[in-house]
Image: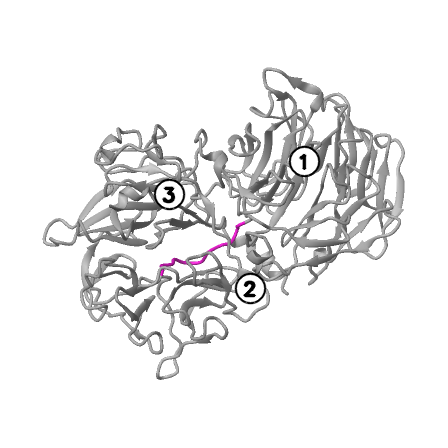
């Protein structure tokens, strides 16, 4: 088990794309009259208009967790949970139902059933992840989060929700990082309730001290209008990068390297009540005068407890730990506490063990973790905690994945349903002859193979490493044969690997001379009607994967390095790309290739409408080529660049190719659909104000790829590190 994986994973989504909302269409934009798009369809109750396009009742995102049949048999829907979780917490309510979890680069999640199931809730957020997700105790509809990434980013900073975390708006952009920042750094003052605001007027934020771009501005910030606007408090630099809390009586409590400080006059003045380094700080909302901390004092680690706002301290020595961190105290029974021995601070060491106590630190019990329901390997990680505000012995933990304990922290069980944050590597296609067969590679956890259209998955241990591995792209040739590109390091060069026994054993494919086949791309495809012929990267097989030959030619007019799609009508056409810039096609199952042309920009995807004889090309923007007349001006502009990431992917529905989907780098409009061959477009990604926001997770953001399942018509997408999502296709009348 390698903790080094978690450290390396800071790069997982450095390339997270984000952008401003822009229109995307041909002759019309999303604001245009869309009545023509459905003029030949009968009006149905399932169809609604009014949110910039044509929507159906089924236009709701659904998580596609990679989950085994065993996990489903245990009554769980599953979820990977591969991104580093940096915060987990309950809202301060009596029922203990509302909870939040934040990752470094994989979005933020919410639960409305006490942490049993989770949904991605990033609508309106442009930051890659989030930490310190805190609800206003006077109105749980109002929630704040500090947006994060693996580095300083202009989209990071403070976001405010007024609908219990379903959607967000940025209120203070700050080029902070937030990577592995586990602090409770935002605090509402419940004594400042304002009826006009509908919540606490005063909110505090302790800005972090770290910056990777020279913009280190640690300080205490304050809002007096419920978090809408913010101002830095002068001469408060020493309170930056600290834990902060506000109790029921309005006292602001701060803990950090310089000790513990209290302000009882809305941050006008501060009083120091403890002068040694604080490692972790916690306060219990139900007990206004109580403060708890772990600290290093006189060379020893101590557990601190005060019941009079720091006037007096009870000290309990903590023996046998390297660094007692992430302390959390039960609001129901303050004798119950939990922490982690953070041995990562030692040279060459990795996070240690979780310990709990039910006697206020007199004795500590080392916790166990049951990971039998985890689809991915059970790695180590820095573990954060959240005690239920209702149930004394219930505590959540972010222990590589979400866990729950019901015995006060003595034992934890996988409880990850819905947390879907896996990083898919490369692109994918369903087997063109059997839409139940699909492989999705993973940048960190090898990848998954499904024989039932993505309902259940087999974990593929390509690398042979216990902690995971890096694969990019792939294709399923038959129920036993899967090919992928395996890398020895993240973002590294990939070589062709294959399994012939459904994922029991794996081999690096060698040619007749014993040479490794290095891959020029990360996509695979097949031939309709002939399952023996398949492609991965620049290689072609005619015997079901037993042997592979390169299609890579020195002449761009005859070579192909990536086959993206096929003619689903069985017409025999294949479409690919050479050298990233040249579109090409084959009329003889990939034996020879003909160049269509180039626009001088990188081509990232292709899709073919066999009825209109139109090839769609994703290349920053969306273009099309009339394949029935290549003598004319080849490339026709279909849609403009959508957000800073542009158009990454395009797909058509094989049963009705006038239904077109594009995946873009836009955070607010990553997936869009056209029902009329690209004339009009509907944004399928949830946006602020979208009535679908409360009906499912925030799928379809920063889409790296879109693909339509030929059997179910569902559109599948993934992007960055937020996992895989699907949306049902249009109603049946669109396929008549």
Give above or below for 514 relative to 377.
below
SS at badge 3? strand
- Vertically, is 268 above or below 537? above
Label 1, residues with CA under 10 Å away: few <14, some 14-19, many ≥20:
many
User: Which comes sooner in the sequence, label 1 or label 3?
Assistant: 1
- In the picture, measured across the screen, residue 543 lies left or right of residue 15, that is left
Of 634 and 734, the residue lying toward us: 734
Question: Toward which corner of the image does residue 536 lie, by quadrant?
Answer: bottom left
Instruction: Identify residue for label 3.
Output: 671
Closer mark to the observer between disc 1 and disc 2: 2
Taking 362 as reference, is 583 left or right? left
Residue 71, horizontal then vertical, whole percent: 57, 58
Q: CA distance from mark 1 to mark 3?
A: 39 Å
Quarter of the image with the C terminus is top left
Residue at left offset 44%, top offset 57%: 454
Position of the N terminus, as image quadrant, is: bottom right
Task: Identify the residue shown where x is 85% and y is 32%.
Answer: 310
- What x and y, as percent, mark residue 608? 24, 53
Question: Is residue 273 positioned above or below 586 on the image?
Answer: above
Q: Which residue is mark 2?
A: 468
| Residue 685 shows in the view | yes
Q: CA distance from mark 1 to mark 2?
A: 37 Å
Q: Is residue 389 above or below residue 342?
A: above
Horizontal side of residue 261 vs 549, given as left or right: right
Residue at screen point 51% across, 33% down: 167
- Find the residue positioned furthest to the bottom: 513
Residue 556, percent across and down? 22, 64
The numbered mark at residue 240 is 1
Secondary structure beneath dot 2 equals loop
Query: How packed is label 2: few (under 14 Cα within 10 Å), some, or many (20 or more)?
Result: many
The span picked out in magenta is: 420-430
Q: Position of residue 93 (x, y in %)?
A: 69, 31
């Amino acid at each position: 088990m390698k903790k080094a994986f978690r450290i390396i994973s800071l790069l997982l989504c450095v390339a997270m794309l984000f952008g401003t909302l822009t229109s995307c269409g041909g002759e019309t934009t999303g604001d245009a009259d869309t009545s023509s798009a459905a003029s030949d369809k009968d009006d149905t109750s399932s169809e609604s208009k009014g949110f910039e396009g044509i929507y159906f009742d089924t236009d709701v995102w659904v998580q596609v967790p990679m989950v085994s049949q065993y996990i489903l048999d245990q009554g769980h829907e599953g979820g990977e949970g591969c991104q580093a979780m940096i915060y987990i917490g309950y809202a301060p309510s009596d029922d203990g139902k509302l909870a939040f979890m934040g990752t470094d680069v994989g979005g933020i999640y919410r639960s409305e059933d006490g942490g049993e199931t989770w949904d991605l809730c990033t609508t309106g957020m442009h930051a890659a992840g989030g930490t310190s997700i805190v609800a206003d105790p006077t109105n749980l509809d109002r929630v704040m989060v500090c947006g994060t990434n693996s580095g300083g980013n202009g989209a990071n900073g403070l976001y405010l929700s007024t609908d219990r975390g379903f959607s967000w708006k940025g209120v203070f952009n700050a080029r902070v990082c937030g990577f592995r920042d586990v602090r409770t750094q935002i605090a509402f003052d419940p004594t400042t309730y304002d009826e006009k605001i509908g919540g606490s007027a005063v909110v505090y934020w302790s800005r972090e001290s770290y910056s990777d771009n020279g913009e280190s501005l640690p300080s205490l910030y304050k809002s007096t209008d419920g978090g809408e606007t913010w101002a830095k408090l002068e001469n408060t630099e020493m309170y930056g990068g600290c834990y902060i809390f506000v109790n029921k009586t309005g006292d602001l409590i701060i803990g950090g390297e310089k000790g513990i400080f209290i302000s009882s006059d809305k941050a006008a003045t501060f009083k120091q009540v403890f002068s040694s380094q604080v490692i972790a700080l916690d306060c219990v909302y139900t007990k206004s005068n109580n403060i708890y901390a772990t600290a290093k004092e006189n060379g020893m680690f101590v557990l601190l407890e005060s019941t009079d706002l720091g006037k007096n301290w009870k000290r309990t020595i903590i023996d046998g730990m390297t660094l007692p961190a992430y302390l959390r105290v039960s609001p129901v029974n303050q004798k119950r506490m939990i922490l982690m021995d953070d041995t990562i601070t030692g040279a060459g060491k990795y996070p240690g063990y979780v310990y709990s106590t039910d006697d206020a630190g007199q004795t500590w019990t080392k916790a166990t973790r049951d990971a039998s329901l985890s689809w991915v390997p059970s790695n180590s990680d820095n573990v954060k905690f959240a005690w239920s505000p209702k149930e004394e012995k219930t505590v959540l933990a972010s222990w590589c994945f979400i866990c729950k304990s019901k015995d006060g922290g003595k034992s934890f069980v996988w409880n990850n349903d819905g947390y879907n944050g896996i990083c898919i590597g490369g692109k994918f296609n369903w087997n063109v002859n059997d839409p139940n067969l699909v492989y999705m590679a993973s940048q960190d956890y090898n990848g998954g193979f499904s024989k039932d259209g993505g309902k259940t998955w087999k974990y593929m241990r390509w690398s042979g490493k216990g902690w995971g591995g890096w694969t990019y792209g792939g294709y399923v040739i038959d129920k036993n044969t899967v090919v992928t590109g395996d890398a020895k390091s993240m973002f590294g060069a990939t070589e062709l690997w294959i399994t012939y026994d459904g994922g029991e054993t794996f081999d690096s494919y060698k040619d007749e001379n014993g040479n490794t086949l290095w891959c020029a791309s990360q996509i695979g495809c097949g031939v309709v009607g002939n399952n023996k012929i398949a492609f991965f990267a620049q290689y072609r097989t005619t015997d079901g994967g037993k042997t592979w030959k390169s299609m890579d030619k020195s002449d761009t007019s005859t070579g192909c390095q990536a086959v993206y799609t096929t003619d689903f009508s069985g017409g025999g056409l294949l479409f690919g790309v050479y050298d990233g810039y040249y579109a090409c096609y084959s009329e003889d199952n990939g034996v020879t290739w003909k160049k269509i042309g180039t626009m001088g920009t990188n081509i990232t995807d292709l899709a073919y409408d066999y009825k209109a004889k139109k090839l769609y090309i994703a290349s920053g923007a969306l273009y099309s080529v009339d394949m029935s007349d290549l003598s004319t001006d080849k490339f026709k502009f279909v849609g403009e660049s959508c957000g800073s990431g542009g158009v990454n992917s395009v797909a058509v529905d094989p049963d009705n190719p006038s239904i077109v989907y594009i995946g873009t780098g836009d955070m607010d409009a990553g997936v869009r659909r056209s029902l009329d061959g690209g004339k009009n477009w509907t944004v399928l990604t949830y946006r602020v104000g979208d009535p679908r926001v409360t009906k499912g997770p925030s799928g379809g953001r920063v889409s790296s790829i879109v693909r339509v399942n030929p059997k179910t018509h569902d559109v599948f997408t993934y992007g960055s590190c937020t996992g895989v999502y699907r949306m049902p296709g249009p109603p049946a009348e669109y396929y008549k």
